Image (cartoon, coloured by chain):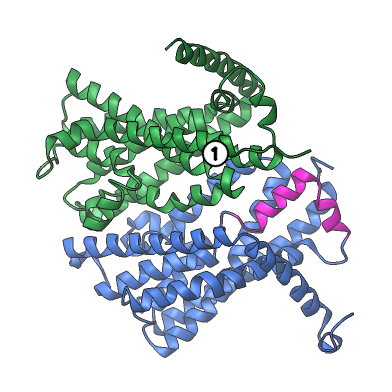
Amino acid sequence: MTELRRALRHYGLYLRLAVKSQRVYRADTWLMSVGIILINVIDMLLLGVLLRTFVRLGGWNVWDVVFLYCMFLMSMGIQSLFTMHLREIEVHVQDGTLDQMLIRPVPVLVQVLGQKVHLKDISHILLGVAGVVLAADRLGLPWTAARIAYLAVTVLCGAALLIGISLALCSLAFWTMHASVFMSGTQEIEEIVQHYPVHIFGTWFLQLISTLLPFAFVNYYPSRLLLHHEDGLPSWLLVAGPPVAAVVVVAIALRVWHMGLARYQGSGS
Amino acid sequence: MTAPADTWAPRWLVLMRAFARQGASRRLAYPAGYWVHLLNTLIKMFGVVTVWSVLYSVSPGSFPIPLPDMIAYGAVSAILSELLGWWDGPHYLIAKRVRTGLITGDLLRPMSLPYQLFCLWLGESLVVLGLVVLPVVAVAAVAFGIGGPASTLAGAQFAVSVVLSFVLVFCLNFLVGLLVMLTLNLYGLMVLYHSVITMLSGVWIPLWLYPQWLSDLTMVLPFRSVYFTPLSIYVGYVRGGDAWRDLGLQVVWTAVGLAVITAAWRAIRRKIVVQGG
């Protein structure tokens, strides 16, 4: 336990440095934040155009879909804010730059994660919160303590899930040298899960994203509960599903990371 | 040693071949990347096909064309977006070369940079056409039952239209690249460009579903020519005289695009600031 506390404390120290170095690029951060908001607002506007005509998609109306979309934004924002640079694991493997981290008395993963922070992604989170609040207002959903707690917990679980999936995929670089292809391999599926209520894609797709690539626990299942679309789903799945999925995925990801790190051989120079 | 065939070929064609080959090998460098690309294209097609089928079953009256045609619109658009890309085209190459300073080498070559980049992109696109688009088209026809173009004439017009779109989107990408050169900010511009294309080209949602003011806006901009023109010809939403008119408009936009990049490149090439070196 003390080891975990120590690791967390170190992570905090690293993060503070990362924030400092990010703040040098203030204009860039602002510009990118505006870009992120623009891209997502236009995406939602187009969903609005679509649902203006059709009113419902798989039984969900436009505000249901905005809620779904923005829940994903929040989890993805947390993931990107802290762990976007996991994609650079492959660069570390190629260049052998983990050498210097292996000799420090801090876990390598803490050092890798603590290297950077992506402040622009705060805009993902802010837009996500704004969209969820607005949609809940339009749908007349109440904000009880239990619902807020459930939302907060599932967003964090969703973030953990996304982080776990990306850590596992990026760690494959220890075997293959290149891992960005695995990351982009899930890109279209993520797009689909973010945009649409996924039951319209049929049972097999829903099973795929509930088990092998459990993206559905990020926004789909929590939204079904919060939007009162839970008909036909067992409540244990909706309540316990996201945390269980998050824990399993993170455990697997850490295992893959450690197995990979054990294979790491440096650059040989 | 040059092959005998090169002796009669005009110089621009020889250069095109050389650069296209380089572009092709860029694409072929990572086989794993290829499989992921193929898989993603299939998933994207599956996604749009499903969404349109579901929406059609909700309200068939909202569509000016029958269901199979609407599904074809979505599937062909998903496939076309692999050829008419706006994320990692010439602008990305320009930005990268300005950053690393490689652009100085490109400028030394006795061949204009726009043409170099066009040939590179052509080579990459031919690889994508052969190895991604054709297999996906086969899957689309066999597994998804996507129909062909509305008529033989529509098919021919579609083919011409796609070629024009290819040149037009190159011009747009190149202009974005020049803006990146001036502002040295890739991400912000790319995001803006992406938003404009997804909103105004009809790549995701056919323009007939747009509110009037938005579809009016697309009429005066070039983006609609990139996706909506070939797609609406393919499914037979636009035919006869209207199809020729849209093709004509595409020719005009493409000519304007080529003229603008030539002029802009001439004006800008002496002002380039190289970041690295």
Q: Determine whether, in the image, residue B171 is placed left or right of residue A51.
A: right
* Residue shown at the point (60%, 21%) measured from the top left: A18
Q: Is mark 1 on a helix, strand or loop?
A: helix
Q: Is residue A248 magenta?
A: no
Residue A196 horizontal/vertical position (percent): 29, 49
* Vertical comparison of B238 with A208: above or below: below
Q: Determine whether, in the image, residue A28 is placed left or right of residue A52.
A: right
Residue B191 is at least partly visible in this image:
yes
Residue A181 horizontal/vertical position (percent): 54, 52
What is the quadrant of residue B107 in the picture?
bottom right
Residue B47 horizontal/vertical position (percent): 34, 59
Q: Determine whether, in the image, residue B151 is placed left or right of residue A219.
A: right
Q: Does the magenta stretch include residue B94?
A: yes
Which chain identifier belongs to the blue chain? B
Looking at this rendering, what residue extends furthest in the left direction?
Answer: A232
Prevailing SS of the magenta stretch: helix
State the extent of the magenta-drawn residues as a range: B88-108
Q: Nearer the viewer, residue B205 or A237?
A: A237
Looking at this rendering, what residue extends furthest in the top direction?
Answer: A2
Q: Determine whether, in the image, residue B10 is placed left or right of residue B201.
A: right
Residue receiving disc 1: A260
What is the three-letter code of the residue carrying label 1?
Gly
Which chain identifier belongs to the green chain? A
